[in-house]
Image (cartoon, grey):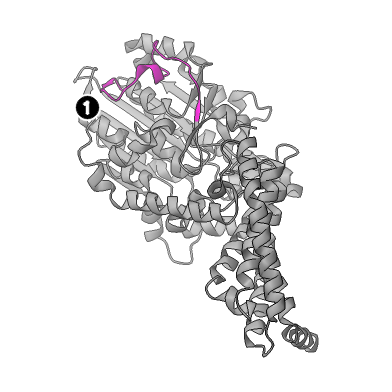
Amino acid sequence: MTKLKELAHWASSRSQITYYWIGILTLILPNLFLSYSMDVSLVGRILNISLPLGVWMLILALGRKPGKTLLFPFGIMLLIGAVQLVLLTIFEGAVISVDLLLSLFSASGDEAGELLGGLILPIALVLVMLIVAVYSAICSWRSRLLLSSSFRRYAGGAGLGIILLSLPLAAWANRIQAQHTLRGDVYPLNVFYNIYITGSKLSQLAHLDETSAEHSYHASSAHSADEPEIYVFVLGETSRAYSYQLYGYPRPTNPLLSARDSSSIYLFRDVLTESNTTSKSVPIILSPADAEHTDRLPHVRGILTAFKEAGFHTAFISNQPENRSFLDHFAYEADEHYRIRDIIRSKRSLMDTRPIYDGDMLPFLDEVLKKGYRKLFVIMHGYGEHWSYPDRYPSEFSFFKDDAPRGARPKEKEKLVNAYDNAIRYNDYFLDAVIKRLESYTEASTAMYYTSDHGEDIYDDARERILHSSPTLSYYQLHVPAILWLSPAYRERYQAIARTARANERKAATSRSNLHTLLSLGGINTPERQDSLSLLSPLYREGQRSYLNDRYECVPLSEMIT
């Protein structure tokens, strides 16, 4: 304690020049780390340091007590900088993104807790830095000493000079990379630009009911009104095709699906997601909007409405937390809506914190099936292989042992992979269980279609990337499974669709094809259906694959993937 007091006394007796440079270092530290790892030219990296450095040198030289200037009105920059530094420990070169900002308004306590639990050390280190910076600023404010007029002129003039020298660098960086901009690539301007975009998206979400009210699919069914039909669309989470035995992975992660009659299983082997974040990928999957037409999102209804208009009873069963997003807007279009986490937890004691697994959705599917609807369309939205991996499966599914990683760190890779692969095996059990239920309806045309919103990085190569949502993409985040199961009755009635599905298995596609494939599967005629995008249509055409970046800008995937 004495040492701590001595340190505090030493810190509180420094000159205002010392406090000035402590403030500068604290403010510019995120720029230093970003410039080391960001995906821009060398000129862009230098600009990312020089321009903010000049600005902060000028601003902190305006007052006689730099700590006072730093805390008011720029104290928020200390908090933003702290968040930015923690983020860089997860995603190299990543700035505070629109998706991260939106998650502040939508992420559940479960999801946030699981992620933050693996970041205790980085958070602790950044917190210490923040405390030092704030304490120094307070000491500066309380000190009787003042910055001399000569130092303020020198520092302010130097800051202004650095700003002026940085302006040609901005033009140079843009010439090297046409997409390079100050608002998009210089911290903290890019953070404030992302905050602006986040505000516009939140405004769209707040008015969804009004802006989408007039949308109709004008849908009808091409199938006989007397034909019993049951279609289940299972939408996975964070599931990458790379880790699927069905797709060539050497470990037995799909023992049940692999053992099934191959004539009933169709594997679309080259499907890439159009976004590596759930908040953007899932709305694209569930609606006519896609990476090229995201401006449609606030103005359309989802696929559930299309099936309802065609005479189907619809249900949405979810193991995801509610997040007040486009996804929830589409989910509530269903005739029946089950948010199983809320339902199950309402029946548990507050002390019961056991995870809720995707298999817990099966009793709710049973409940819907036993009601006997002649035309039924069900969406099951799982939590799949989302972090934390060991929480995604019961202990009896721990097939690959040593599966308890201590956080997301490179040295834990083997345990992380074991846990992730166990989660894939549990998903295999879950999908097989859905199929078994559909198999019992021998007279009905039944089918299950499964895909995932995006994949995942698990320290797969020298880049040592982990999780998803990173600004630069990888194959592991993009390549997702797309698996179709058709019942014997369906294959008999719709032989052309079965043949076409087999013929299209190896064709290149993106997640924009999911809606059109499902509409074809259910025989739904609508002007929104584009057979050139349906993997069940002979009219399917491969084309340029696009990606929706963090700022909702459509870019060719070829420019993004690494």
Q: Give the residue type at disc 1.
A: Ala
Quadrant in which the N terminus appears? bottom right
Name which residue lies at 39% across and 49% down.
Answer: 201
- Camera sees residue 348: yes
Q: How crowded is mark 1: few (under 14 residues within 10 Å), some or many (20 or more)?
A: many
Residue 211 or residue 555, whichever sits in front: 555
Residue 441 or residue 547, whichever sits in front: 547
Instruction: Estimate the x, y position of residue 124 in percent, counting from the top left.
Output: 67, 67
Name which residue lies at 55% across and 39% down.
Answer: 426
Span of residues in magenta = 522-546
Tell me: residue 264, above or below residue 47.
above
Name which residue lies at 48% across and 51% down.
Answer: 356
Quadrant in which the C terminus appears? top right
- Camera sees residue 370: no
**Drawn side of residue 405 relative to residue 502, left or right:** right
Instruction: Estimate the x, y position of residue 539 in percent, counting from the top left.
Output: 39, 11
**Drawn side of residue 155 relative to residue 451, left or right:** right
Name which residue lies at 48% across and 18% down.
Answer: 543
